[in-house]
Amino acid sequence: MSSSPPESKSDEPAEASAPKSSNRKLILIGTPVTVLLLAGVGLWFTGILPHALGIDKHAGQVAEAPKPVPPSYIDLPEMVANLNGNLRKPSYIKLAARIEVPNPGDVDKVKAALPRVVDLMQTYLREMRPEELRGSAGTWRLREELIARANIAVAPAQVTDVLFTEMLIQ
């Protein structure tokens, strides 16, 4: 019986040494492969590897890019509206503006809807108070609201900007 316990002890180190050497081989082979794979991915996404291989997708895209079409501008008639505010001393706004239409094909649609655009803008101006128009932030809010209302009036055409040529608050 004393001979059988030493045999079991000698079997364990032989079995333990086999997996230890296979793990070591796996680490020695897997580490360089992983490093090369990560380096290749990094070079690909930085654009160095495609350029080195002659795969330039940007060169083909630059030649295919269409030239931008300049926007069209439509003058709005001069608008005068009384502002909502103090009843003792009425305030007025005089506004002359242009609207920017990015697609030249939509100019006729926008001109056809111009009475509706002016109506929506006049209605909005009549509800504003003089305090809301003070400073550049007030002008910016007015511009954004007028763009939104113009887009509602001319849908499906699009208005990208309202340019103030004259704005007088009295």
Image (cartoon, grey):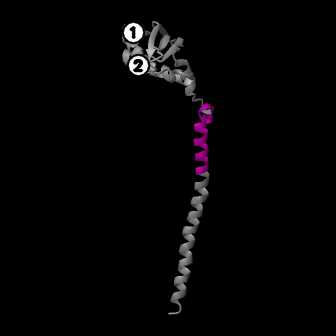
Give the labeled residue for mark 2: 149
40 magenta-colored:
yes
Magenta-drawn stretch contains 70: no
Residue reaching furthest front? 88
Residues under labels 1 and 2: Cα distance? 12 Å
Residue 135: x and y in percent read: 57, 22
The label shown at residue 114 is 1
Viewer-side residue, 158 vs 125: 125
Front residue of 82/54: it is 82
User: What range is drawn magenta here?
Assistant: 34-51
Image: 25 above or below 104: below
Which secondary structure class fits the magenta region best? helix
Q: Let me know if residue 25 appears in the view.
A: yes
Q: Position of residue 157 (x, y in %)?
A: 39, 15
Q: Closest to the observer: 89 or 26? A: 89
As drawn, the label of residue 18 is none
Residue lying at 42% horizontally and 17% vertically, measured from the top left = 126
68, above or below 5, in the image: above
Position of 32 compared to 3: left or right?
A: right
Q: Secondary structure at mark 2?
A: helix
The amino acid type found where label 2 is placed reads Arg
